[in-house]
Amino acid sequence: MSPEQLGMVMLLLMAVSLLIGFPVAFTMMALALTFGFAGLGFLVFDLTVQRIFTVMQNDVLVAVPLFLFMGYLVERAGTLDGLFRALKVMLWWLPGSLAIATLATGTIFATATGIVGAAVTLLTVMALPQMNKAGYNRSFSAGAIGAAGTLGILIPPSILLILYGFYAGVSVPRLYAGAFLPGFVLSALFLIYIVGRAILRPQDAPVVPKKLRENLTAGQMFGVVMRGFVPITLLILFVMGAIFFGLATPTEGAALGALGGIILAAINRRLTWHTMKESVFLTVRASSMVGWLLVGSSMFAAVFVRLGGGAVLTTFVAGLQISPEQFFWISQVLIFVLGWPLEWTEITIIFMPIFLPLLAQFHAKAPDSFATDPFFFGIMAALNQQTSFLTPPMAMSAYYMKGILGKAISLAEIFRGFLPYMVAQVIAMTLLWFIPWLAYGPAEAIYGKAIFR
């Protein structure tokens, strides 16, 4: 068997292993070493060691555990409780006010942390009981919570964009600037759906009854709003402002965010030994998962390319005679479909190293097309991968909610609530395609025009 054939068999086995449910990182490492030794001999060991050290020496990846630590501390500082209460007090008079407050809380929380599981879990615990008491439709409530909790995938400080920047060689601050407007456009589309449904079907999202409203004086309401908004807003401005305006690298900004999370927990009197220990433990667990995936993916990609598998794919795609725009959308459709059985980490870490060399081939033919720009491709892919938390059968947001609620709601009801938000994500992708300024405008205003444009 030729090296090229070994590479394609390795790719096929990797896809089968993912569908069966084998541990992703260790499966890729085992396949890389086995097929690499068969096709390259002892050279595979030198190659894999080099790839491991390349991953370990990347400074940008240090931001991943630091942002995770910041997020877990913010979560345990009670910030989300105060934020949700402030929004609920301010918005009670609007149609679907509790769902709107949930969406706004998820959007703001996404700018402080990209931890989707924590956001969905906390919003479920806080918002769903109050929606149930107000008489909200259960599917509608579940959809609003699930959609709001996933915004951290796209809105900075997105962990996905850090990993994509590592693979694509694109500046992470530029990706952060480019993702802001698409993220808030998506949130605005969610808002339009919530308000529209609340107006057209008021029985699904009734006005909050008087007995559930807080009777506060103007001074008390001002205090609730200030305590709920100011701390987390200052933290967001402090961290993201430092990164956007060149005062700190993403890693330094993440370190500032971790420090800000500690201060926030101390202000809220939540900075205990238990809080720190739990935050560190969760950070290490999540970072280890990402780290092993990065190592496994780097080994697999290096062996796959060295065996000639990359050249086979490039030749095959070139033979299809498709345009850069067609390749762009074929890739996005594949990413969308992959989101059904896989999580965003697996899609980003495993499949982006396959898509990006092919994208580079089209970029060489059409360097002025934003369809071949790795920056624009990454923003669209991040927006696309929002669906990985909402699409059955592996919609993790649904399982987070089901784990908390048990028999109180069925998975079918949760998935039914998610469907309109998936439509909104497709609309957001269409808007981004026809209005690329949404990504390029902020990035070029802050950093200037990139060299690849």
Image: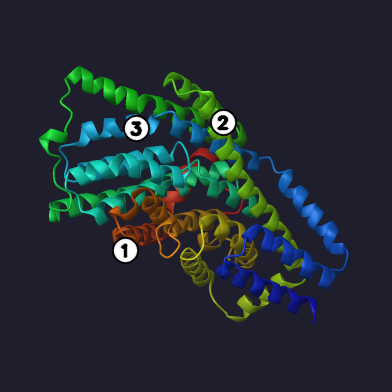
Residue 412 is marked as 1
**Of the image marks 3 and 1, the number of the one nearer the N terminus:** 3
Q: Residue 90 appears at what percent x and percent y? A: 22, 32
The picture quadrant where one finds residue 322 is bottom right
Q: Earlier in the sequence, mark 1 or mark 2?
A: 2
Kindly identify which residue carries mark 2: 277
Front residue of 445 and 268? 268
Answer yes or no: do the residues labelled 2 and 3 have beta carbons within 8 Å? no
- Tell me the kind of residue under disc 3: Asp
Q: Residue at x 83, y 68 (%)?
A: 37
For the point 50% across and 66% down, the residue is 338
Report the residue marked by disc 3: 81
Reading the chain from its start, which is encountered first: label 2 or label 3?
A: 3
Q: Quadrant of the C terminus?
A: bottom right
> Residue at the location (35% across, 47% down)?
148
- Compared across the picture, whether 415 is left or right of 268 comes to left
Residue 150, x across and y down, in percent: 41, 49
Q: Of all residues shown, which one is farthest toward the right?
A: 42
